[in-house]
């Protein structure tokens, strides 16, 4: 990596993206039925996606110098470190995920959807967890596990029933 600035841009864009993702999920799950909660979800969800895109741009600029080959190699090395398999295909999965997320965020912003599908919610949670485990510092497993436990508790608890439920 060329500079400390580049390192910070890569790290903090993704960290803020994850924080906003957690805020969006939290508001979606615990702000059920309140209009201001739906707006917060849309804003946090969309900003989280934009920051994730900024993270990818920063990584390509500062770390990989706009080389797809370097990004694939880096992804394969990091995946091998964690799961023991040298595979860079996760990079393409990330591209698909970011595209799906962008479509979802645009639908929420335009008002053509009032919520994100359960399939996307689970996919996003899986992607965030895996990215944190593979690329995050070792200590990130603690807040990740706390969030995962809270999510499991929430999903096992019966949903609140409101006339204008937004989930």
Image (cartoon, rainbow, N blue to C red):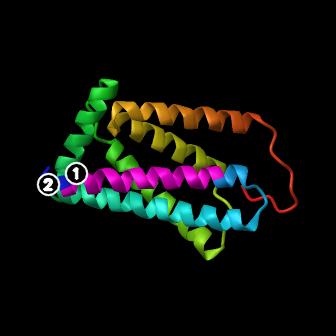
Q: To which residue does mark 1 refer?
A: 7
Q: Secondary structure at mark 1?
A: helix
For the C terminus, give its image quadrant.
Answer: bottom right
**Residue 125: x percent and y percent?**
54, 43
How far is mark 1 from mark 2, CA to CA?
A: 6 Å
Q: Is residue 119 magenta?
A: no
| Residue at 61% in and 51% down | 25
Near mark 2 (Cα within 10 A), the count class, few <14, some 14-19 or many ≥20, is few
| Residue at 59% in and 69% down | 107
48 or 67, nearer to the observer:
48
**Residue 147: x percent and y percent?**
56, 38
Q: Is residue 24 left or right of residue 12?
A: right
Q: Secondary structure at mark 2?
A: loop
Q: Which mark is residue 3?
A: 2
Q: Which mark is residue 31?
A: none
**Residue 100: x percent and y percent?**
50, 58
Q: Please tell me in which quadrant of the rendered image residue 162 appears.
A: bottom right
Q: Please tell me in which quadrant of the rendered image residue 9 appears.
A: bottom left
71 or 96, nearer to the observer:
71
Q: Main secondary structure of the magenta part?
A: helix
Q: Is residue 114 at least partly visible in the picture?
A: no
| Residue at 83% in and 48% down | 160
Q: Which residues are magenta?
A: 5-26
Q: Is residue 75 left or right of residue 27?
A: left
**Residue 20: x percent and y percent?**
51, 55
């Amino acid at each position: 990596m060329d500079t400390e600035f580049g390192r910070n841009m890569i790290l903090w864009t993704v960290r803020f993206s994850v924080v906003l993702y957690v805020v969006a999920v939290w508001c979606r799950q615990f702000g059920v039925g309140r209009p201001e909660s739906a707006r917060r979800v849309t804003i946090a969800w969309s900003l989280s996606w934009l920051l994730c895109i900024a993270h990818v741009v920063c990584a390509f600029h500062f770390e990989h110098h706009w080389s797809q080959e370097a990004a694939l190699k880096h992804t394969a090395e990091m995946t091998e470190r964690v799961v023991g398999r040298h595979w860079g295909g996760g990079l393409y999965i990330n591209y698909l995920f970011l595209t799906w997320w962008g479509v979802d965020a645009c639908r929420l912003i335009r008002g053509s959807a009032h919520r994100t599908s359960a399939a996307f919610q689970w996919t996003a949670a899986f992607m965030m967890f895996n990215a944190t485990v593979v690329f995050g510092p070792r200590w990130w497993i603690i807040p990740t596990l706390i969030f995962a436990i809270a999510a499991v508790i929430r999903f096992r608890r019966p949903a609140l029933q409101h006339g204008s439920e937004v989930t």
